[in-house]
Amino acid sequence: MVIQICVGSSCHIKGSAEIVELLQQAVAENGLENEVTLAGSFCIGKCNRVGVTVQVDDEVHVGVTREGFREFFDRNVLAKLR
């Protein structure tokens, strides 16, 4: 699974660095280092007013925030790998 986190200016302002950290922690906590590749993207083209844009394989998710991160990760990463 490839997860791309937008680190363009709009998402950077909305906390993309924090989402990267949360993803790194969640991948490590769940022992998914050999199943998940994290990558940055300068623009995924789906800017949103709230949160960060994250692409999981071919699915684009907008509005990923710290508060909604666990639900996002459980639904879009863990559920698809298990």
Image (cartoon, grey):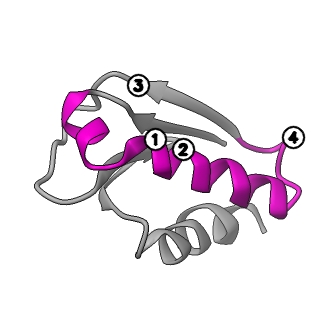
Numbered tag placed on residue 34 in the rendering: 4
Q: Earlier in the sequence, mark 3 or mark 4?
A: 4
Please report the residue visible at 74 percent of the width from the left and 54 percent of the height from the top. Answer: 27
Q: Is residue 82 above or below residue 4?
A: below
Taking the image as shown, residue 70 lies to the left or right of residue 16, namely right
Q: Percent x, y for residue 49?
A: 10, 55
Magenta residues span 9-36
Q: Which residue is mark 3?
A: 41
Residue density around tag 3, few if under 14, some if 14–19, many if 20 or more, within 10 Å: some
Please report the residue visible at 84 percent of the width from the left and 44 percent of the height from the top. Answer: 33
Q: Is residue 62 magenta?
A: no
Q: Which residue is mark 2?
A: 20
**Is 9 in front, or is 64?**
9
Q: Are marks 3 and 2 in contact (CB under 8 Å)?
A: no
Q: Quadrant of residue 45?
A: top left
CA separation, marks 2 and 4?
A: 17 Å
CA separation, marks 1 and 2?
A: 5 Å
Q: Percent x, y for residue 30?
A: 83, 63
Q: Which residue is mark 1?
A: 17
Q: Earlier in the sequence, mark 1 or mark 4?
A: 1
Helix, strand or loop under label 2: helix
Quadrant, the N terminus: top right
Quadrant, the C terminus: bottom right
Please report the residue visible at 18 percent of the width from the left and 60 percent of the height from the top. Answer: 50
CA separation, marks 3 and 2?
A: 11 Å
Helix, strand or loop under label 3: strand
Helix, strand or loop under label 1: helix
